[in-house]
Image: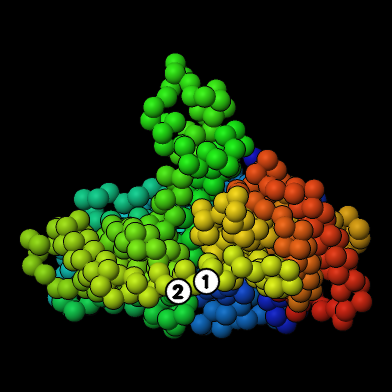
Amino acid sequence: MTQLITTELVELDQNLGNDPEAVIRHLASKVAATGRATEVEGLFADAYAREQKTATGIPGGIAIPHCRSAAVVEPTLAMARLSPKVDFGAKDGPADLVFFIAAPDGADQAHLKLLSKLARSLIKKDFTAALRNASSEAEIVELVDGALADKPAAHAAAAPADAAPAAATASAGSGAGAAAAGPKRLVAVTACPTGIAHTYMAADSLVAAAQEMGVDLQVETQGSSGAKPLDPAVIAAADAVIFAVDVDVRGKERFAGKPVINAPVKRGIDEPAKMVQEALAAAENPNARRVPHFGAEEQAENEATEKGEHIGQKLKRALLTGVSYMIPFVAGGGLLIALGFLLGGYDITGVADKVVLENSFANLPEGGLAIYLGAVFFKIGALSMGFLVPALAGYIAYAIADRPGIAPGFVAGAVSGFMGAGFLGGIVGGLLAGYIAHLIGTWQVARWLRGLMPVVIIPLLASIVASGLMFLVLGGPIAGLTTALNTWLSGMTGASAVVLGIILGLMMCFDLGGPVNKVAYAFAVAGLSAGSATNQAPWQIMATVMAAGMVPPLAMALATVLDKKLFSLAERENGKAAWLLGASFISEGAIPFAAADPLRVIPASMLGGALTGALTMAFNVTSQAPHGGIFVFFAIGNVLMFIVSIIAGTVVSALAVVALKRWAVKKSVDTVEPVPVTV
């Protein structure tokens, strides 16, 4: 393997600036200067974005800025011993030892384990003391190489470094030093967004603190180099659980019923002893917060509440979950319906049931194989589309109450469909089912009854209440509202239709796959099945939404061609991929550009999207397919004007973003929103 650190990547006793930004930029420059990164700005932006999410300073005068970046060619360590020190957010003050860890997006497991091993070595005082006393760059490299080559047994408090995600264990038996009044067995999970440094350092810090207190603690590290789950028997025997995480815990339902302490991963490094003490206290407290028996989402909600998440954010999260799970039903079903129309014509809707039931390959109907296959495709698609509202409602409820919410949500969605309440009814039914299931799940019941709660009692009672409310109270009014809305939209022609197209275009480009975009998209696909040869308004809305959603990534791709100098190397590479993403109707292809420069990219995208939306409506373009972009051309009516509308919006957006980047007041790099790091 390539050496992770060389003398060219070490700075000793240098003034690299007064803040983390300056230090990270300098170290990114060193990495690029050695040929290990393709550009400074892309690497700096990714590393600084990670720093802004969570400060990387840790106790002991150490900082570990780190990231994954497309700009990195090979895994690299750069090290600086600072004079003067710089504050990286540690509670005990500024840092003089800074390790900059730069990993490629596709770093292999072996390198990730080495990087993680270095990070966990930094909590050893003898190692950091040696770094401070080193007299040359070569001595630093030798120390780091020695730490990386060290065998797992040399670090008693750490998990095996060659199996970084495996459980870490500290056990002190039952001697006098053990916690006298509390339990002695704990489990923990550590995880951070990048999964290279903090994940493993928090694990080691917690294990070391537990060992000093005479407590047996086993840790599951859910890091970038994989995760080996804790033994179920170990979890079952534990008295409490610690979650030191900045991301969702994978498999949280395994810890159901355990008293839980939850905190950011950095607290596991800064205050491990306090977290262990809190876990011991929670184990003795019958009223302590516990991991819910019905899964991870309630726990996520509790965590979000503690962080101050308001009701609007919770609703948004639930709605987006429902829409994301609904889309596969809609996409597959819509394309199959479109294929059915292609093969069997519009009249297939009236004869599909009869053709499918009464015919076969050996007994083809009048019209031959095309009619038979058209009927089959149409019927499969129609059945799939029939899950649209139940799936939406079911997974909205799932986002609120986890698995026990799915059945009540699906039932409430089916009731909504039966009563004609449609998409709006599905949202209301899903929210009702989810919150009712959530409420029932909080009931304190006898231990023998707990096993029946998620599989029988919660689904039964939540279905009765939620669906009963839909039947008796809410379904009728919502159905009336839905009918009125569909009638109004179907009657829109001329100028009013163009205005609707502008509104939908603006919504699709406002947040590029976010809540506003998803609302517009869900609105379109919800009405898709109502389209027909005599009522093509729902198909026009679908075409408008799809065309406008294709504009942002295509426009950014075109802009990187029109003026390359305005974009970083990483953005130019993203631009190449954006051609295909845009053509496929994946609006998220423009997110890297919007994240780096939102005040220019988003307004420019909305301008082009509004134009495209207006043109598709004006030209009466239709789409019977809910997804696929240009690749479902066979399902698009007036496909030529569909393409013209997209080209017009793309050109306008591309020219607008180029103009804004050239002549609008430019931000300095240190104030530009950094590109989010994908881990």
| Residue plotted at (23% across, 64% down) | 463
- In this rendering, would 321 be left or right of 657? left
| Residue plotted at (24% across, 56% down) | 235
Amino acid type at circle 1 is Leu
- Mark carried by residue 485: 1
The one of 339 and 37 positioned closer to us in this rendering: 339
- Mark carried by residue 427: none
- In this rendering, would 65 be left or right of 179? right
The one of 584 and 66 positioned closer to us in this rendering: 584
Secondary structure of residue under mark 2: helix
Q: Is residue 283 above or below residue 196?
A: below
Quadrant (top left/top right/bottom left/bottom right) for the C terminus: bottom right
- The structure's colour scheme is rainbow
| Residue plotted at (52% across, 24% down) | 366
Tally of marks? 2
Residue 412 visible to an observer of this rendering: yes
Q: Quadrant of residue 156?
A: bottom left
For the residue carrying disc 1, how many other residues have a C-alpha within 10 Å: few (<14), some (14-19), or many (20+)?
few
Give the distance between the C-alpha atoms of the residues marked 2 and 1, in whole angstroms.
6 Å
Mark 2 near mark 1, Cβ–Cβ under 8 Å?
Answer: yes
Quadrant (top left/top right/bottom left/bottom right) for the N terminus: top right
The one of 412 and 342 positioned closer to us in this rendering: 342
- In this rendering, would 25 be left or right of 320? right
Q: Position of residue 501 (x, y in %)?
A: 70, 67
Q: Position of residue 197 (x, y in %)?
A: 53, 61
Secondary structure of residue under mark 1: helix
Residue behind mark 2 = 481
Q: Position of residue 621 (x, y in %)?
A: 71, 55
Q: Is residue 34 above or below residue 212?
A: above
Amino acid type at circle 2 is Leu
